[in-house]
Image (cartoon, rainbow, N blue to C red):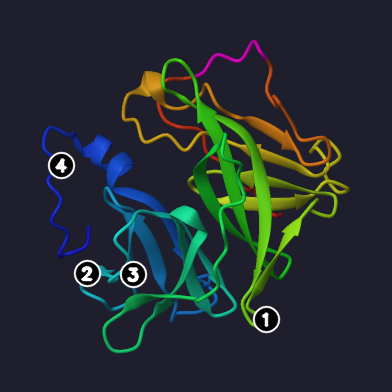
């Protein structure tokens, strides 16, 4: 944990702290290929960013915004983070590390009937994509996903584009990772489909978000399932995506 973390996880077990404290971890480079890599995490109740480099005695917390971070991405030499309302910032490592807003205003694209549930960042074949997930709450106050909007921030031009499709690819979005695959190479993956798991923050295994996962079809704007109805969910953790070698 970062040396200056002041959270008080009262009443949590060590396993619950592992689930609760560190939400995501990424690397700037493969440590097997470069020794000067940087590890970046989002941690704590507000998903604060912190980094570590080989030789550092502890993690360094980055001064940020007064809001929770949704996702983090290493893209073309910089770390970017996105927060609520599509607020995009870049990590500045000069002097005291801090977050600096990129200056590009990307209004929330959802309608007044919906609400933003989560934002994701992904390097899509050399394009940075910001993906906005929106939905509503059911009668039990559980979040239900209604769809996704794919946005490409064009930082150099200070503008952005809305994508109608993802060029036949499939996206896999989750709290732990965002992955894209070519559905032509993997024909069982839905073309222009966005597979998603629920970004729940609940520690309870019964409430770990299995009520809201599926695949969003960007072509006809519908949501379907990607698993058999006979699947019995193990109440051990929230579902995550993995990328087997040698993909």
Mark nearest the camera among 2 and 4 is: 4
Alpha carbon of mark 2 to alpha carbon of mark 3: how far?
A: 9 Å
x and y percentages locating residue 116 in the rendered image: 51, 43
Q: Which mark is residue 58?
A: 2
Q: Are marks 3 and 4 in contact (CB under 8 Å)?
A: no
Q: Secondary structure at mark 1?
A: loop
Q: Is residue 242 visible?
A: no
Residue drawn 62% across and 51% down?
109
Q: Are marks 4 and 1 in contact (CB under 8 Å)?
A: no
> Is 156 on the left or on the right of 187, as rendered?
left
**Mark 2 or 3, nearer chain start:** 3
Q: Are marks 3 and 1 in contact (CB under 8 Å)?
A: no
Give the alpha-carbon distance from disc 3 to disc 1, as whole Å: 29 Å
Task: Provide the residue span drawn in magenta.
Answer: 229-233
For the point 44% across and 76% down, the residue is 37
Q: Are marks 2 and 3 in contact (CB under 8 Å)?
A: no
Q: Which mark is residue 157?
A: 1
Mark 3 vs 4, N-terminal side: 4
* Tag in front: 4 or 1: 1
> Which one is in front, 82 or 230?
82
Disc marking residue 9: 4
Q: Quadrant of residue 122?
A: bottom right
Identify the residue position indicated by label 3 in the image. 51
Q: Secondary structure at mark 4?
A: loop
How many angstroms separate mark 1 from mark 2 (CA)?
38 Å
Q: Residues within 10 Å of mark 2 (few under 14, many from 20)?
A: some
Q: Quadrant of the N terminus?
A: bottom left
Classify 147 as above or below 54.
above
Residue 143 left/right relative to 58? right
- How far apart are the two marked residues, 3 and 4, measured between alpha carbons? 21 Å
Q: Is residue 211 magenta?
A: no
């Amino acid at each position: 944990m970062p040396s200056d973390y002041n959270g008080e996880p009262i009443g949590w077990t060590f396993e619950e702290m592992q689930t609760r404290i560190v939400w995501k971890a990424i690397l700037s480079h493969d440590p097997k290929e470069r020794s000067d890599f940087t590890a970046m995490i989002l941690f704590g109740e507000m998903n604060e960013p912190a980094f570590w480099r080989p030789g550092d005695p502890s993690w360094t917390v980055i001064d940020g915004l007064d809001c929770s971070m949704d996702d983090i991405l290493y893209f073309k030499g910089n770390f970017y983070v996105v927060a609520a309302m599509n607020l995009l910032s870049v990590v500045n490592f000069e002097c005291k590390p801090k977050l600096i807003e990129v200056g590009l205003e990307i209004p929330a694209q959802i309608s007044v009937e919906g609400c933003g549930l989560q934002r994701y960042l992904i390097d899509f074949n050399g394009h940075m994509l910001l993906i906005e997930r929106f939905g509503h709450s059911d009668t039990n106050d559980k979040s239900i996903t209604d769809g996704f909007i794919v946005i490409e921030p064009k930082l150099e031009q200070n503008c952005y584009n809305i994508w109608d499709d993802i060029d036949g690819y499939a996206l896999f979005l989750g709290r732990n990772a965002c992955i894209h695959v070519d559905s032509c190479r993997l024909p069982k993956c839905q073309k222009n489909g966005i597979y998603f798991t629920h970004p729940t923050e609940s520690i309870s295994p019964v409430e770990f978000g299995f009520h809201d996962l599926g695949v969003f079809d960007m072509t006809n704007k519908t949501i379907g399932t990607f698993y058999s109805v006979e699947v019995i969910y193990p109440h051990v953790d929230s579902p995550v995506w993995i990328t087997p070698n040698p993909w």
